[in-house]
Image (tube, rainbow, N blue to C red):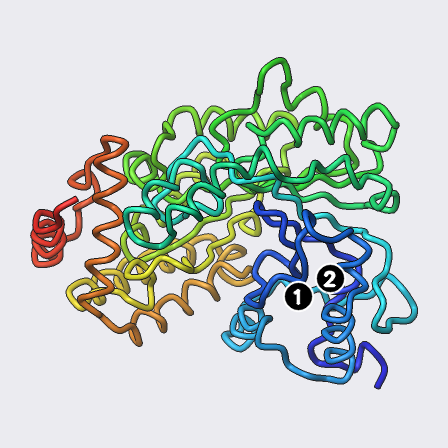
Amino acid sequence: MEFLDSPYFCEYMWTHLYKSPDDNVKLCCIDKGDSLGNLQEKTLEEIRNGDVYKKIRKDVLAGKKLDRCKICHEQEEKGIGSYRKTTASFKNYDEYAKPILFLDYRADNTCNLACKSCGSGFSTKLIDTDLKLGIITESEASTKRLFSKKNKKVLEYKDALNNIENIYFAGGEPLVNQQHWDMLDYLKNTDRLKNITLSYNTNLTTLTFKNYKVEDYWYDVESIDVMASIDGFDKGFEYFRTGAKWNTIVDNMKRVTRINKNALRLSITVGWMNLKSVLDLCKFVLENNIISSYENIDLTYMYGCEGGKLSETPLEIKNELIENINLFLDYLSNHKKIYEENNLKSILISFIKTINNSVDNDNSFKKWITKLKIIDKQYKTNINEILTFKNPNINNRIQNTYNSIVI
C-alpha cells in the first residue's frame, strides 16, 4: 500500500516531536495512548526510532486505525476538521522517523493561571486542586512541582532540530518560561529565526518576561501564529481563566495585531457552563475587528473535566444552550461569508448534536462543582458571577450543590 493510500496516514508520526510538560514524548498533543518514552530515561533517537514508535508507523501504513488517534477520528466523523496532517513532505515513508520539521514543545507546567478547565499537568497553580480532588497523590504532586527543575532543556537536543520549520510553544504558559526565551535567543543568534514559523498557545496575560518582549523576536520570524486561549467574555472569562484580567487580554490582543494583523487566533475550550460567554466573546472580537478572519476562531470541546463537558450538559439548560447557539448562527448568517465558508458553523452544529445527546449525571455534576469550589476558595473567585442562566432551576441546582460541598 502506498502511504497516501492509507486512510489514517498522518505525517506527524514521522516529522513531529511532541514533548509534554513531564518530558514524555507522544505522537501529538491529543494522542490518547501511552508515552512513547521519556527524555529523562532515553535519548531522542532511542524514542523516535524505538520498537513501539516503529510499529505505530507500520500499522498506519498498513491502513490500521489506531485507538490512540481517536480524537482526530471522532472529529472527522462529525464532519469537522482534525489535526491530522495528510500531506507529505517526503517521497517515501517506512517505519523509521524522518527529520523533525515540527516541534511541539511544552517546557514544563509553569503557569500563572488556575484555569477551571485545566489541570496540574499543565499548571502549577492547580497542583493543590488536583490533590484535594484525589486526582493525584502526594507523591505525584511532589513530582509535578519539580518539573521545571528536573526536565531536560530544549537546547540540550538542539542538534536534532537542524531541519526545524515550525515550532509550537505551549505549556504551562510559554511566555513566562525561561526555556522559551532561550530558544528564541538561540534561533536569533544563529540567524535561523527568519526561516521559522512560530506558533503559540498562550493565555495572553503577558507579552513580556524579565527583560524580554515579544516584539524583539516576532517581527523577525517568517510567520507567526498566536493562538490565545480565551474561554469567555469579560467577567465570565475572568472566572474561568482564574488570575487573568479581561482588560489586559483585550490590550494584548490588540498588541499582537499591531505586530502582525493576521497573527491572532482564538483557541477556545467550550463546556456547558461557559458556552454563552464564549459566544459573547466571538461577537466581541468580530464586531471590534480584533480577529482578522472568521477562520481564526477555533472552538474545541472541553476534554478531561468530568461534569463540565458539553456531553454532560444538565437537563435544565439543554434548550437554553441550544437556543443560544441558534441565535448566534442567526447572527452569523448576517455575515454571509462567515456563515457559509468556515468551520465555525460546523462546530456549532456539532455542539447542538452533542447537547441533545448529552447525559446529565449527578455524580459528575458534583465533581465539576467541587473543582470550581476548591479553586474559588484558593484564589478567591466567586461562582455567583457566572450564574446568569435564564432557567432559575439550574442556577439553584449549582448553588445548592456548591453550598453542600465541604472543602
Q: Position of residue 56 (x, y in %)?
A: 72, 74
Quarter of the view holding residue 45 = bottom right
Q: Is residue 26 above or below residue 65?
A: above
Q: Is residue 406 above or below residue 262?
A: below
Task: Judge by depth and name the residue closer to the eye, 399 or 140.
Answer: 140
Q: Position of residue 183 (x, y in %)?
A: 73, 31
Report the residue at 51% width, 49% height from top: 297
Horizontally, is 218 left or right of 325 in the view? right
Q: Position of residue 113 (x, y in %)?
A: 41, 34
Looking at the rendered image, the disc whose residue lies closer to the viewer, 1 or 2, is: 2
Mark seen at residue 287: none
Mark seen at residue 84: 1
Report the residue at 33% width, 68% height from top: 311
Identified by mark 1, the residue type is Arg
Quarter of the view holding residue 313 = bottom left
Q: Earlier in the sequence, mark 1 or mark 2?
A: 2
Report the residue at 71% width, 64% height from top: 85
